[in-house]
Image (cartoon, rainbow, N blue to C red):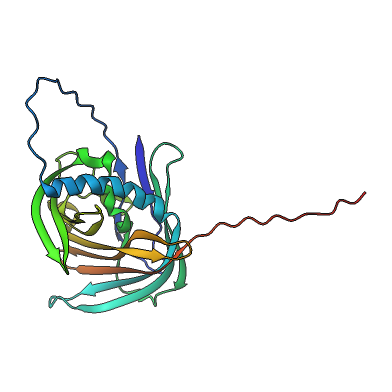
């Protein structure tokens, strides 16, 4: 079984460096336990929250297909002082489409340009796509590619979050890749997930590159994705959607930072119109 996420480059931007997220190769493992085995140790609250998150992440991809939003993208070149010394901004109508008709999860990002960025042809910018689907890391079909460990709990504004660390298993396929001169280089990821204890919803996911890809010039990559509940009316519904993604990529000579902001979520509505046509004889 093979799951994949196709991406389209941001219109109006040219670069030799692209970071992609969302290639998913699924490994299924069947585990059989005899009745005489020693009972398993109690599961910690963070790992219980991770189990709930795995259940809710499938619903996330279903709901994502039902909404569109506005995506504001800032592509920046960062100086040694950590501040952007050049940036370009674009605006798109954005949708993440999920399809399981073939039996495998297939994801496609759709972008229609609202506002194209002014292009400086002398600048090399970073293209980052697919990071809203980073929740593939905790998709039930993907747990064989990572190890997960409890990392304690944290309370923010009265809400309790479980923290879970993840780390790529050596040799396992990675959903993140660097695309350079037409070739994809898998990026091993490790990081931390903040999960709302009661609902199992992920509030934040931070991932970094687990090891350097210095042979192709990539020294570091860090991404931070935030999610929040979006409320709809008539009928009343609440969807759990991405609200921002910040991606930093560094080489020996360059530091890029791309920021994606997602606002103005709208829900699709399907209507059926029936017309009676007079039959002429």
Horizontal and vertical percent position of residue 127: 32, 63
Q: Give the quadrant of residue 224.
A: bottom left
Left or right, 248 with respect to 260, comes to left
Above-or-below relation of 15 to 90: above
At x 13%, y 75%, the residue is: 80
Quadrant of the rendered structure where residue 15 is? bottom left
Front-most of residues 29 and 33: 33
Give the left or right position of residue 35, taking residue 118 as reference: left
Q: Is residue 74 visible?
A: yes
Q: Relative to the observer, which residue lies in front, 64 or 258? A: 64
**271 sits left or right of 221 in the view:** right
Determine the residue positioned at 27% across, 41% down: 140
The residue that appears at 56% across and 56% down in the rendered structure is 270
- Give the answer, above or below, for where 136 lies relative to 262: above
Task: Please give the name of the residue rendered at 26% of the width and 55% of the height, measured from the top-left corner.
Answer: 201
For the N terminus, the quadrant is top left
The one nearer the camera, 201 or 253, is 201
Residue 281 image offset from top left, x and y in percent: 93, 48
| Number of numbered tags placed on the structure image | 0
Image coords of residue 262 (percent x, y): 35, 68
- Residue 81, percent from left and from top: 12, 78
């Amino acid at each position: 079984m093979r799951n994949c996420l196709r991406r389209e480059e941001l219109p109006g931007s040219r670069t030799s460096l692209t970071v992609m997220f969302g290639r998913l190769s699924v490994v299924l493992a069947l585990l059989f336990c005899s009745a005489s085995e020693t009972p398993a140790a109690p599961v910690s609250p963070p790992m219980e929250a991770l189990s709930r998150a795995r259940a809710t992440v499938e619903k996330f991809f279903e709901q994502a297909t039902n909404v569109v939003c506005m995506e504001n993208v800032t592509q920046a070149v960062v100086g040694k002082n950590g501040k952007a010394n050049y940036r370009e901004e674009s605006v798109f109508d954005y949708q993440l489409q999920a399809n399981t008709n073939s039996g495998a999860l297939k994801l496609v990002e759709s972008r229609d340009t609202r506002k194209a960025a002014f292009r400086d042809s002398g600048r090399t910018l970073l293209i980052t796509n697919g990071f809203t689907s980073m929740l593939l890391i905790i998709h039930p079909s993907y747990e064989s590619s990572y190890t997960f460990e409890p990392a304690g709990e944290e309370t923010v504004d009265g809400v309790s979050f479980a923290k879970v660390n993840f780390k790529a298993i050596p040799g396992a396929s990675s959903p993140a890749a660097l695309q350079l001169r037409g070739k994809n280089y898998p990026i091993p990821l490790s990081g931390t997930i903040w999960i709302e204890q009661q609902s199992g919803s992920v509030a934040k996911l931070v991932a970094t590159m687990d090891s350097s890809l210095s042979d192709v010039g990539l020294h570091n990559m860090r991404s931070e994705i935030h999610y929040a509940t979006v409320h709809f009316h008539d009928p009343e519904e609440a969807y759990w959607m991405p609200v921002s993604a910040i991606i930093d990529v560094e080489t020996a000579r360059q530091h890029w930072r791309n920021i994606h902001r997602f606002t103005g979520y709208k829900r699709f509505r399907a209507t059926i119109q029936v017309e009676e046509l007079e039959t002429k004889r």
